[in-house]
């Protein structure tokens, strides 16, 4: 993160629009420029504060064949979710830091926000951190699950066998609730690292009078990293945030989710394994398990990725097997192109597919071929 000098100001770069009058500067550029200026003013009083504007623009062309039907589409967010965000941090002295993060997903094909109901749908939080005591964070944030690096495709749901299967609950019966990709109304505490081991705990309120329990998500994850080895294990209990009856208080049974993952680097090659189980407590529901293997090999600007995931629902004919092979080429640290080839084979009542190519017909298979470009900033 770049630190701003005390006597400098945040300058939004309009150089590429230098031959245009201000009325022709795109609205997004004017908006981000205003946001940056406001951020600079708010933090101008501290010589040890910094503000960063960051994000990613990612678009891909996809051919798919799904349940016998073919299509060609332009889509957003194949290797990274297209997004922009603002992050700030201030050194309060004595090893204590204050920070915030606001992050919004966007659909690069339309320019719309990724979420119709939330501008900062990916993150909106504030935190205090200490080198000795850990991190306390409040607001919308990641759930208590393992690191993205245990998935070769970094848990990007558009094109990832693991991300497409691990949180699926629609076929498990009534009253089942999934762990959310981002958790609202959450407070977390993360310990410092002790010999490579850290623990993060999460409590999220349903923020509704009369809700019992008050919690919508209680979770914990333990991560260990030392040398080439990474290990992770997590548990989450989630409750519905909506009521069964209109106007009622949030109610419904608990759903439990367990996850474990590992990664090991053999030089330029990293192998990964992940396991998850979703176990509802509601009567008449089913248990789902996911097993995933992956590998990432990197040499200079070349990256080869491979992942396979198998999902099984106990007690009925409902299984899915997905696989994806990918190649990335990085022109620089920020800009690269990528290609993906893969698909899902569904059995019985299963309707699992990639986020970019959902499957709606039980037992149908799907195939995707994608070519994309991504630039981070």
Image (cartoon, grey):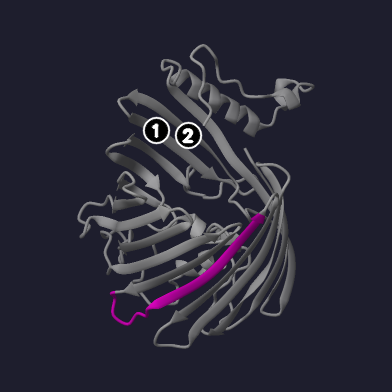
Relative image position of residue 283 (x, y in whole percent): 28, 80
Magenta span: 281-298
Q: Residue at x 45, y 16 (%)?
A: 44
Q: Is residue 296 magenta?
A: yes
Q: Is residue 248 magenta?
A: no
Residue 172 shows up from this direction: no
Residue 295 shows up from this direction: yes
Q: Quadrant of residue 240?
A: bottom left
Relative to 36, say whether 341 is above or below.
below
Q: Quadrant of residue 286?
A: bottom left
Relative image position of residue 210 (x, y in whole percent): 20, 55
In the picture, the disc for residue 82 is none
Q: Residue at x 34, y 74 (%)?
A: 279
In the picture, the disc for residue 99 is 1
SS class of the residue under badge 2? Answer: strand
In the picture, the disc for residue 87 is 2
């Amino acid at each position: 993160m770049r630190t701003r000098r005390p006597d400098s100001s945040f300058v939004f770069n309009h150089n590429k629009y230098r031959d245009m009058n201000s009325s022709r500067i795109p609205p997004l550029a004017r908006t981000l420029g205003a946001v940056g200026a406001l951020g600079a003013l708010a933090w101008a009083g501290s010589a040890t504060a910094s503000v960063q504007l960051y994000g990613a623009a990612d678009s891909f062309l996809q051919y798919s064949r799904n349940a016998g039907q073919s299509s060609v589409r332009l889509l957003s967010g194949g290797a990274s979710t297209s997004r922009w965000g603002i992050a700030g941090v201030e050194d309060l002295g004595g090893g204590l830091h204050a920070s915030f993060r606001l992050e919004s997903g966007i659909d690069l094909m339309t320019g719309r926000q990724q979420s119709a109901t939330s501008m900062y749908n990916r993150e909106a939080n504030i935190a205090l951190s200490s080198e000795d005591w850990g991190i306390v964070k409040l607001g919308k944030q990641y759930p208590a699950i393992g690191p993205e690096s245990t998935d070769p495709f970094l848990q990007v749901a558009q094109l990832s066998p693991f991300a497409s299967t691990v949180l699926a609950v629609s076929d498990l019966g009534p009253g089942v609730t999934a762990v959310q990709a981002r958790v609202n109304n959450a407070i977390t505490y993360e310990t410092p690292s002790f010999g490579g081991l850290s623990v993060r705990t999460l409590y999220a309120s349903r923020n509704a009078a009369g809700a019992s329990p008050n919690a919508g998500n209680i979770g914990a994850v333990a991560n260990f990293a030392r040398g080439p080895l990474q290990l992770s294990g997590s548990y989450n209990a989630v409750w519905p945030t909506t009521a069964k009856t209109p106007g009622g208080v949030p109610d419904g049974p608990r759903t439990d989710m367990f996850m474990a993952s590992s990664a090991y680097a053999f030089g330029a090659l990293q192998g990964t394994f992940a396991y998850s189980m979703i176990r509802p407590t509601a009567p008449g529901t089913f248990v789902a398990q996911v097993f995933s293997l992956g590998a990432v090999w990197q040499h200079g600007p070349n990256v080869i990725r491979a992942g396979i995931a198998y999902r099984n629902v106990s007690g009925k004919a409902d299984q899915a097997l997905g696989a994806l092979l990918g190649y990335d080429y990085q022109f620089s640290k920020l800009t690269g192109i990528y290609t993906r080839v893969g698909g899902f084979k569904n059995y019985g009542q299963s309707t699992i597919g990639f986020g970019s190519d959902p499957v709606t017909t039980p037992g149908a298979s799907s195939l995707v071929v994608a070519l994309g470009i991504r630039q981070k900033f």
